[in-house]
Image: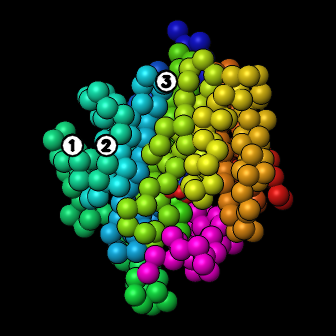
């Protein structure tokens, strides 16, 4: 007998791809973790989403590396980072959690683990015609392959590039950062979260952002809530963004208050460029949820028993 209404909350306009995969699992009584991983996997495998997994933008060397983590509680989390060639990073992170004593595997070790778990590498090394073309276009203005995104001098961070799928930004010349965060609550009232990304486009090879790091890109504690972050990961990493949001909910803040407080902490502690963007999604065990962003342009997708809606952030710190 279900006692809680299921909820899926995902980042950016492609969050609807995640929720469409997650909600049938939740509605049929499946676990929050199964639903969140299925949602993330759907986005990772969708080659039309050049954000995550297959089709994710490569680094400055032209190769794609993926970061992902999954979590249901402090003692139930798993992660992979700098994963090459295997598209379903969220599923592999879950295997790290389920089948090893470790939390995080990186690089060649993560790939070897994926192979040992029976995952099949992508024959195209996660590149698509679209992402190859984006890299070629980037190389025309960065002929030496210099990693713009990692250099402080002259670096202008891109904003809201995930929303290039929308008409208003479809001609964005500067695609860069990409993440789907999925928070779910199942009919038993259990929370789960997944955060998966190809990271900052054209990054310095080896760069890992907030997304696969527990407490930064994602944090879940059944006793307090779940939160996940997207945007310029280097900003999130200085404030332990997701952990901070969950701890604030533990102290009694609502999901919206917690998400806004994280963004305010970032605004207080960093010299922000006008193009910097961070968004936080949060959900508490009661099923209250929220999203907030530093600047306009972020959207979330929220699915409940009755409806699915893609909406702008509930609160924008600098509208
Ligand atoms: N936070 C991700 C990273 O820094 C990117 C993003 O969410 O767009 O790798």
Q: CA distance from mark 2 to mark 1?
A: 8 Å
Q: Quadrant of ligand 1?
A: bottom right
Q: Is residue 74 above or below residue 13?
A: above
Q: Earlier in the sequence, mark 3 or mark 1?
A: 3
Q: Residues within 10 Å of mark 2 (few under 14, many from 20)?
A: many
Q: Position of residue 72 (x, y in %)?
A: 48, 26
Q: Position of residue 76 (x, y in %)?
A: 42, 25
Q: Earlier in the sequence, mark 2 or mark 3?
A: 3
Q: Tell us which disc is closer to us: 2 or 3.
A: 2
The residue lying at 54 percent from left, 29 percent from top is 220
Q: Position of residue 177 (x, y in %)?
A: 54, 63
Q: Is residue 112 above or below residue 276?
A: above
From the image, tell me which residue sits under label 1: 113
Q: Is residue 261 above or below residue 158?
A: above
Q: Tell us which disc is closer to us: 2 or 1.
A: 2
216 on left or right of 129: right
Pick the front one: 108 or 277: 108
Query: Which quarter of the figure has residue 158?
Result: bottom right
Pick the front one: 73 or 10: 73
Q: Is residue 260 above or below residue 169?
A: above
Q: Earlier in the sequence, mark 2 or mark 1?
A: 2
Does residue 9 belong to the magenta stretch? no
From the image, tell me which residue sits under label 3: 73
Magenta extent:
146-175
From the image, tell me which residue sits under label 2: 105
């Amino acid at each position: 007998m279900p006692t809680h209404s299921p909820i899926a909350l995902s980042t950016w306009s492609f969050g609807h791809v995640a929720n469409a995969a997650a909600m049938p699992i939740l509605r049929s009584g499946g676990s929050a973790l199964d639903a969140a991983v299925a949602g993330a996997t759907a986005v990772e495998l969708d080659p039309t989403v050049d954000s995550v997994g297959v089709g994710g933008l490569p680094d400055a060397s032209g190769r794609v590396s993926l970061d992902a983590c999954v979590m249901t509680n402090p003692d139930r989390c798993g992660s992979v980072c700098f994963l090459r060639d295997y598209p379903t990073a969220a599923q592999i992170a879950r295997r790290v959690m389920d089948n090893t004593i470790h939390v995080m595997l990186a690089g060649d070790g993560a790939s070897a683990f994926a192979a040992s778990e029976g995952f099949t590498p992508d024959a195209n090394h996660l590149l698509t015609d679209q992402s190859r073309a984006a890299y070629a276009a980037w190389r025309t203005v960065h002929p030496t392959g210099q990693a713009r995104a990692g250099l402080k001098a002259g670096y202008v961070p891109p904003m809201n590039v995930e929303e290039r799928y929308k008409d208003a930004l479809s001609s964005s010349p500067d695609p860069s950062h990409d993440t789907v965060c999925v928070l779910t609550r199942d009919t038993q009232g259990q929370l789960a979260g997944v955060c998966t990304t190809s990271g900052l486009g054209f990054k310095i090879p080896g760069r890992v952002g907030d997304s696969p790091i527990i407490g930064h890109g994602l944090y879940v504690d059944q006793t307090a809530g779940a939160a996940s972050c997207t945007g310029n990961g280097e900003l999130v990493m200085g404030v332990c963004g997701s952990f901070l949001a969950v701890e604030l909910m533990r102290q009694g803040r609502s999901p919206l208050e917690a998400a806004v407080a994280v963004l305010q902490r970032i605004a207080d502690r960093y010299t922000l460029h006008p193009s910097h963007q961070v968004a936080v999604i949060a959900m508490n065990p009661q099923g209250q949820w929220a999203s907030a962003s530093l600047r306009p342009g972020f959207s979330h997708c929220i699915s409940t028993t009755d409806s699915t809606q893609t909406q702008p952030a509930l609160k924008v710190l600098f509208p």
